[in-house]
Image: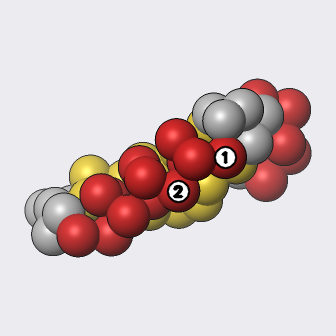
Amino acid sequence: MKLTCAIIDDEPLAVELLESYVRKTPFLELKGAYNGGITALEAL
């Protein structure tokens, strides 16, 4: 079973690092990476 996750952070480097980690973790499924809460809410 995979855990679904989304990355939401206003720091581009943090988003990039977390996205890389999630993609390398077999039990995590990334639904999206966003640079702000409003952007994430609109997308999700």
Q: Amino acid at mark 2?
A: Glu
Measured from the top left, where is residue 14 in percent x and y?
52, 41
Residue at figure coordinates x 61%, y 54% from the top left: 33
Say whether marks 2 and 1 touch (CB < 8 Å): yes
Q: Residues within 10 Å of mark 2 (few under 14, many from 20)?
A: few
Alpha-carbon span between mark 2 and mark 1? 6 Å
For residue 28, above or below residue 12: below
Which type of secondary structure does the marked residue at label 2 adopt? Answer: helix
For residue 36, above or below residue 17: above
Residue at figure coordinates x 59%, y 59% from the top left: 32
* Quadrant in the picture for the N terminus: bottom left
- Does 9 sit left or right of 18 as displayed? right
- Does 40 sit left or right of 3 as displayed? right
Measured from the top left, where is residue 35 in percent x and y?
74, 42
Q: Residues within 10 Å of mark 1 (few under 14, many from 20)?
A: few
- Residue located beneath label 1 in the image: 12
- Does 10 sit left or right of 26 as displayed? right
Measured from the top left, where is residue 39 in percent x and y?
84, 42
- Residue located beneath label 2 in the image: 16
For residue 22, above or below residue 34: below
The answer to which image quadrant residue 10 occupies is top right
Q: Amino acid at mark 1?
A: Pro
Measured from the top left, where is residue 2 in percent x and y?
21, 61
Residue at figure coordinates x 86%, y 32% from the top left: 38
In-front residue for pair 9/41? 9
In-front residue for pair 4/17? 17
